[in-house]
Image (cartoon, helix red, strand yellow):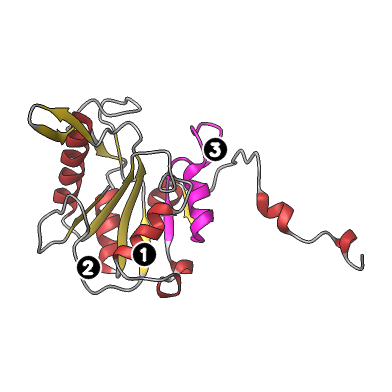
Amino acid sequence: MVGARSTKRALSPTRPISPPPLKRKVESSMTISTASGNTFPRNASDWKWWHASVPSRLKELDADGYKVVIVSNQKKISLQKEVKGGRSDSKSLTNFKERVAAVMKQLDIPLCVYAATQDDEYRKPRPGMWKEFLDDYDFDVSGVDLSESVFVGDAAGRPRDHSQVDRGFAANIGVPFKTPEEFFLNAAPEPLVEPFNPHLYLQSDPADKGA
């Protein structure tokens, strides 16, 4: 599921609009949390900025030429429901759209949102949403400044985190990763729990040399 906003054109509920001129850098971030404190939002209005600094920081990125992209796992969303005479958006999808529209309206910068609603190639840490973004904007990997891009997420593999899918997503698409605390508050990196790192097994073993 894809949505996009331009400061000149309306929200598209299905496909992103043509982007404005930009430097081909990408910043993808965790920007909001629930106002209720629940893990999942109760309704469309149950949201708040993760920190008061988030809106101004994202506007700075936009002014500096970054493309701001939000990618989110939303498996609890049902896209449509059966109704008399056809199909319509489910309540969970309507709430999500309204929440995203409210975020976009307050930010008022070009922004695109990708949401994975199934356990498929689009769900983080798999790179499907990243590939979709590149395709939607006619980019290839060589056209994006990966070293100057950053992915920000709270599923970072720290002891208190529910998973490390955000850190894994950043590794899979090849961009630097930061937690919200590191990116928005300039906090020092925290210890993380990393149960498996395949990169360690891809490095050559000195004992194998000359075999």
Residue shown at 36%/51% (left/top)?
A: 29
Q: Mark 1 packing: few (<14 Cα in 10 Å), some, or many (20+)?
A: some
Q: Where is residue 151 in the image (x, y as percent from the top left)?
A: 43, 54
Residue for badge 2:
19
Query: For this view, does 171 lie left or right of residue 103?
Result: right
Residue for badge 1:
134
Residues in magenta?
150-176
- Looking at the image, residue 29 lies above or below residue 144: above
Q: Position of residue 49 (x, y in %)?
A: 26, 41
Task: Residue 171: name its quadrant.
Answer: bottom right
Which label's residue is closer to the chain start, 3 or 1?
Answer: 1
Q: Which of marks 2 and 1 is in front?
A: 1
Residue 175 versus residue 207: which sits nearer the camera? 207
Q: Do the residues labelled 2 and 3 touch (CB within 8 Å)?
A: no
Residue 190 versus residue 7: which sits nearer the camera? 7
Instruction: State the SS at label 2.
Output: loop
Instruction: State the SS at label 1.
Output: helix
* Label total for image: 3
- Looking at the image, residue 28 lies above or below residue 36: below
Q: Position of residue 6 (x, y in %)?
A: 16, 61
- The alpha-carbon separation of the residues under discs 2 and 1 comes to 12 Å
Task: Residue 159: name its quadrant.
Answer: top right
Residue 106 versus residue 119: which sits nearer the camera? 119
